[in-house]
Image: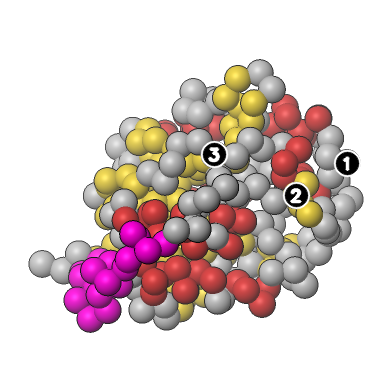
Amino acid sequence: MARITRAALIQASNPAPPEASIAETKKQMIDKHIELIKQAADQGAQVTCLQEIFYGPYFCAEQDTRWYEIAESVPDGPTIKLMQQLAKEHKMILVVPIYEVDMTGVYYNTAAVIDEHGEYLGKYRKHHIPHCNPGFWEKFYFKPGNLGYPVFETSAGKIGVYICYDRHFPEGARELGLNGAEIVFNPSATVAGLSEYLWKLEQPAHAVANQYYVGAINRVGTEAPWNIGEFYGQSYFCNPRGQIMVEGSRDQDDVVIAYLDLDMIEEVRNTWQFFRDRRPESYTNITKP
């Protein structure tokens, strides 16, 4: 029997005005995503991934300690508990990227994975942390991830996560492949004029090099008061051949749905024997500091 997974990506703008409090902004974004998650469930999604730090604006456009208050513990914070309830209600696996506080003063850019029974399976912490113009001051907020590149066994397939800036580094994408990933989600926040020309190059390249599906998510709209650029959406799925299957809007909230034929992975790997033919013993500089 064919192994078909119906998967969804959610991209969304921030509805809160710039004068809104952090708590009100967070509430508005969570309320919006509750409805979008329901839309994904109504379309039959078995697994849904949200965008990077889905419950707020991309606050890394400034360096201000006030944003530490948006962080929560994982899995014990209220947002993950809510998402566990929603996953159980909709019988749907959820990949939930939030701002994590691990201990006082230690924060990570994290994605929790929750199964369709509402059980917390684990988390991925973003490894590669940018700190650059225009307005991507992430080292102020995030410690680099320290949990490796986990792959989570689910009823919808073996799921891995790579977050935003991670996508510029093929090494972690290969680690996910070696760890058995069949679907890799990359929740992001990236603006036009900076990385858009790479958006449909790098992740399809990871998909074909490692012969798995990639779901790439980007938020939409502009976010005042920073206005660092337009978050250009265009969330998409690509298959193990690196072909883009379906793509979301550039400037609207969207639920992007695709059927992922997991049997294609074996078919492609039997054609292109990249894992057989790799030569790790010859790669001497890749792991040097």
Does the magenta-highlighted stretch encompass residue 277?
yes
Residue at the spot 16% in from the left edge and 69% down from the top edge = 2
Residue 19's disc number: 1
Residue at the spot 36% in from the left edge and 79% down from the top edge = 241
Q: How many marks?
A: 3
Is disc 2 placed on a helix, strand or loop? strand
Kind of residue sitting beneath label 1: Glu
Where does residue 237 sit, x and y in percent of width and height?
A: 45, 70
Measured in 3D between alpha carbons, the distance from the residue under mark 1 to the one under mark 2, in whole angstroms, is: 26 Å
Q: Looking at the image, is 109 positioned above or below residue 131?
A: above
Kind of residue sitting beneath label 3: Gly
Q: Main secondary structure of the magenta part?
A: helix
Where does residue 116 sit, x and y in percent of width and height?
A: 32, 42
How crowded pointer 1 is (Cα within 10 Å; few <14, some 14-19, many 20+) is rated as few
Q: Is residue 14 left or right of residue 98?
A: right
Q: How is the image coloured?
A: secondary structure
Q: Looking at the image, is 105 positioned above or below residue 91?
A: above
From the image, state whether disc 3 or disc 1 is nearer to you.
Answer: 3
Residue at the spot 30% in from the left edge and 37% down from the top edge = 117
